[in-house]
Image: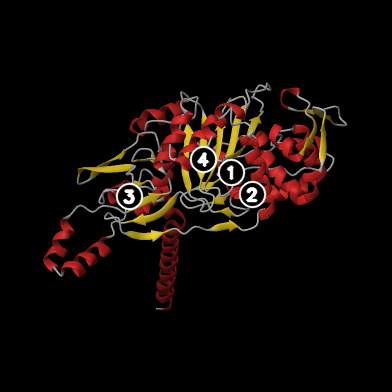
Amino acid sequence: MKELSKSVRNVMVIFLFCFIALISYIAYFQVFKGPDIANDTGNKRLWAKRNEVLRGTIYSRDGEALTNSVRIDKDNQSREYTYGDLYVHSLGYIDERFGLTGLEEEFDSELSTYNSFGNGLRSFLSDFDIKKAFENRDEEKVGNGIVTTLDHDIQKAAYDAMGDLKGAVVALNPKTGEILAMVSKPTYDPANLEQIIEDANTGVDKEFKLLNRAVDGMYPPGSVFKTVTLAAALENDPSIVNRTFSDTGKITFPDGRELNNYMMQAHGNLSLQMAYRVSSNVVFGTLAMEMGNEKLKEVSERFGFNARINGIGISIPASEFPTLKPEEIGNIAQSGIGQGSVLSTPIQMAIVASTVANDGVLMQPKLVNKIVDKDGNTIKEYPNKALKEDVISKDIAETVKEYMGYLVSNNIYRWPAFEGTNAGGKTGTADYMLEDGSEGIPHGWFISLAPVDDPQIAVAVIVEEGENGAGSAADIASKVVRMATLGY
């Protein structure tokens, strides 16, 4: 009998062990693997669940419907993008074969959610009609909508101004952090997604059309970064506004290397304001060496470098500013002019311009303002939020704005679209090396804010292989600023 009891106990122990192991296995999958499995593109149950609800609409800030969903049958629907490729890098795509990207992915839950309780309750309270409330259950369930921060007119102005050039445009409202326009080119037709992805996977697409250059493109910022160096120098030594610099056209370092001005031009004696206007590499390389890497890196990081920036509806990868040893004076000088190991996304440089425009306050970037139900009733709003209150002082911001305004006003003959906008700006020419060690055709940059006395918009433009920022990049920026400030 005792042996039987012992055998039963052994069986019970084994059973208990197996039960615990099974529960642990299930828990592991639920907790650690569950989300991945649930969100896997190939999860047919997830797609079936999505298709129970007609996907909600994504709108521009001014009410333009940017997407439309059409019911094919009870198990299928099609997603249409009203303006083709105009918004494609912001909106992303949704496809059962290829998954989700952009806002379609970020707000998938909201777009797939039918606010049934709210709709039924409003119907009941407004009409006191129980029969109607029950009838509503048979209506098409439509997901909630998203109201973005994108301004249709500014977005189209940026898109049209870019034409067939490669690069990106980002426009922000400096007071709120709202993204008013975000264009990346080359672009692609979302209606032809299968071919686009096949081309990307097979290497046929050499232009990386799927890449959102505005957010994920990393480039040397070149001379637009001198705006950060200027702010750091003013903070480091306010008296430099009265200093005269001698620009001989180049700096020669102890190891024999040289830092030259653009086109090898020597500018002679310069005030700080004139050094910014003519974009003197000699002056700004000198300022970087005088401040040292630690100071310039600290100010750069206040502007957002070296850290991911999490916005509303957008996550921005970290732009890069290097840590250098004091004896690396050549590299320190290069960093002061936005070269060397400095890398930036276009949206990061828009954030720099926006922070200057907003008197040193860095606002959280926003791509979405609110969630609404199918009738346009607000479900959730995303408030404006300051990420950093004191990136630079208001006085320094005013000086930088003044210098940016001086640069544009003295070049208005080159950029006629800026006329009447009271804009400020900074050009940039970014050098880089190709994989074979040769020099690539420089990228052209331009950052802008307008109007200088009370900025309502901040813009960053990069044109790949644009040669210099005073050409196509400035022209594009001027047209975006003009639309935002003058409406045409």
Q: Position of residue 76 (x, y in %)?
A: 24, 43
| Residue linked to disc 4 | 170
Asked if residue 383 is positioned above or below residue 255 in the image, the reply reads below
Labels 2 and 4 touching (C-beta < 8 A): no
| Label number found at residue 46 | 3
Query: Could you tell me the amino acid type at mark 3?
Result: Leu
Q: CA distance from mark 3 to mark 4?
A: 34 Å
Residue found at x 13% / y 63%: 132
Q: Going by the image, does 290 lie left or right of 50?
A: right
Labels 1 and 2 touching (C-beta < 8 A): yes
Residue found at x 61% / y 28%: 470
Labels 3 and 4 touching (C-beta < 8 A): no
Q: In the depicted view, which residue is nearer to us: 29 or 86? A: 86
Q: Position of residue 320 (x, y in %)?
A: 65, 42
Q: Position of residue 300 (x, y in %)?
A: 68, 47
Any part of residue 292 in sight: no
Query: Could you tell me the amino acid type at mark 1?
Result: Gln
Mark 2 / mark 4, whichever is N-terminal:
4
Q: Disc 3 vs disc 4: which is toward the camera?
A: 4
Query: Could you tell me the amino acid type at mark 2?
Result: Phe
| Label number found at residue 348 | 1
Mark 3 / mark 4, whichever is N-terminal:
3
Q: Disc 2 vs disc 3: which is toward the camera?
A: 2
Q: In the depicted view, which residue is nearer to us: 200 or 379? A: 379
